[in-house]
Amino acid sequence: EALRLAGPDLRDEVRMRARLRAALRELRLAESVLLENALASLLGGERRELTDLQAERPPALDGLSRQAMDQRVSRGRRALTRAKQGWPQRRRPALFDLLRRPNAASL
């Protein structure tokens, strides 16, 4: 209800954030975490230092060098400007994908 009463600028911002978050869910975990951090200002968050982010998200970023993380951010930003087929995709479905399937309730 509040969104309906909000101005068009706020509605556009919320839609953009939702599309961006949906796009991030389609990426591999490391790219998703790194790009979410790089685009934090667009998502209404605060950008973290990569070393802090790595400590907070070890399953996603453990073992990656600073150079590797910078490179993934750069490649990921370029990829998101292309068609979805050019995005770095996951090798297997994530838990999120499995739960949003129509028959997930029977799992």
Image (tube, rainbow, N blue to C red):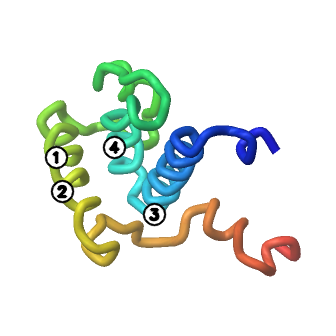
Q: Residues within 10 Å of mark 2 (few under 14, many from 20)?
A: few
In the rendered structure, the answer to whether residue 2 lies left or right of residue 59 reads right
Q: Amino acid at mark 3?
A: Glu
* Residue named by callout 4: 35
Q: Position of residue 86 (x, y in %)?
A: 25, 72
User: Which residue sits at x=56%, y=39%?
Assistant: 10
Q: Position of residue 101 (x, y in %)?
A: 71, 75
**Which circle marks residue 74 in the picture?**
1
**Which circle marks residue 26 in the picture?**
3
Q: Residues within 10 Å of mark 1 (few under 14, many from 20)?
A: some
- Quarter of the picture containing the N terminus is top right
Q: For marks 1 and 3, give the CA distance.
A: 17 Å
SS at badge 4 = helix
Kindly indicate whether the residue at mark 3 contacts the one at mark 1 (C-beta within 8 angstroms).
no
Of the two numbered discs 3 and 2 in the rendering, the one whose residue sits closer to the viewer? 2
Position of 64 relative to 81 (above/below): above
Which is nearer the N-term, disc 4 or disc 3?
Answer: 3
Q: Residues within 10 Å of mark 4 (few under 14, many from 20)?
A: many
Quadrant for residue 83, please give it. Answer: bottom left
Which is nearer the N-term, disc 3 or disc 2?
Answer: 3
Position of 62 relative to 20 (above/below): above
